[in-house]
Image (spheres, rainbow, N blue to C red):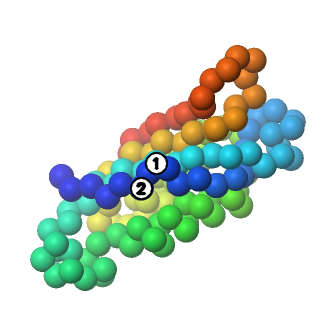
């Protein structure tokens, strides 16, 4: 299967369970892997024959920047649903990272990865 990859999309948003997370924006990073048959696009060289990853990046950015969710699981599900709205996408893997999680130990990030 062919894949379109979007890696390291960064945006700030207001997401989390703790009271301070509900009012303070923090950085998130998103990776997306889309299962798409790219044979037509490879033959025609036409954007209409593939998923417009530029438009998809903007839609993902909007989910992170404008919606509010308590759980990374919910944000990842919203992004996966957005990706799967295009009928050419037969599968999507979404990783959402909280880059500065409010945990009592030093960690690089916390993340959720879902596959739909």
> Which structural element holds mark 2?
strand
Q: Position of residue 31 (x, y in %)?
A: 46, 48
Above or below 70: residue 10: below
User: In terms of sequence position, does the residue under pointer 1 or pointer 2 come before the other?
Assistant: 2
Q: Position of residue 115 (x, y in %)?
A: 39, 41
* Quadrant housing the C terminus: top left
Q: Position of residue 93 (x, y in %)?
A: 39, 45
Q: How many numbered marks appear?
A: 2
The reply to whether residue 60 is in sight is yes
Residue drawn 57% across the image and 47% down it = 29
User: Would you say 5 lies left or right of 65 here?
Assistant: left
Instruction: Mark 1 and mark 2 in contact? Answer it, CB < 8 Å.
Output: yes
Q: Position of residue 92 (x, y in %)?
A: 37, 50
Q: Which labelled disc corresponds to residue 18?
A: none
Crowdedness near tag 1: few (<14), some (14–19) or many (≥20) residues, C-alpha within 10 Å: some
Above or below 40: residue 60: above
The reply to whether residue 92 is in sight is no
Residue drawn 20% across the image and 74% down it = 41
Residue drawn 70% across the image and 17% down it = 105
**On the image, numbered disc 1 is attached to which residue?**
31
**On the image, numbered disc 2 is attached to which residue?**
6
User: Would you say 53 lies left or right of 61 here?
Assistant: left
């Amino acid at each position: 299967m062919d894949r379109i990859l979007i890696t390291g999309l960064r945006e700030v948003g207001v997401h989390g369970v703790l009271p301070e997370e509900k009012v303070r924006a923090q950085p998130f990073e998103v990776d997306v892997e889309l299962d798409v048959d790219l044979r037509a696009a490879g033959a025609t060289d036409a954007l209409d024959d593939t998923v417009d990853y530029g438009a998809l990046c903007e839609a993902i950015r909007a989910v992170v920047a404008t919606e509010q969710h308590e759980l990374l699981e919910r944000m990842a599900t919203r992004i996966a649903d957005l990706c799967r709205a295009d009928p050419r996408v037969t599968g999507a893997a979404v990783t959402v990272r909280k880059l500065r999680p409010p945990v009592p130990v030093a960690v690089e990030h916390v993340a959720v990865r879902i596959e739909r």
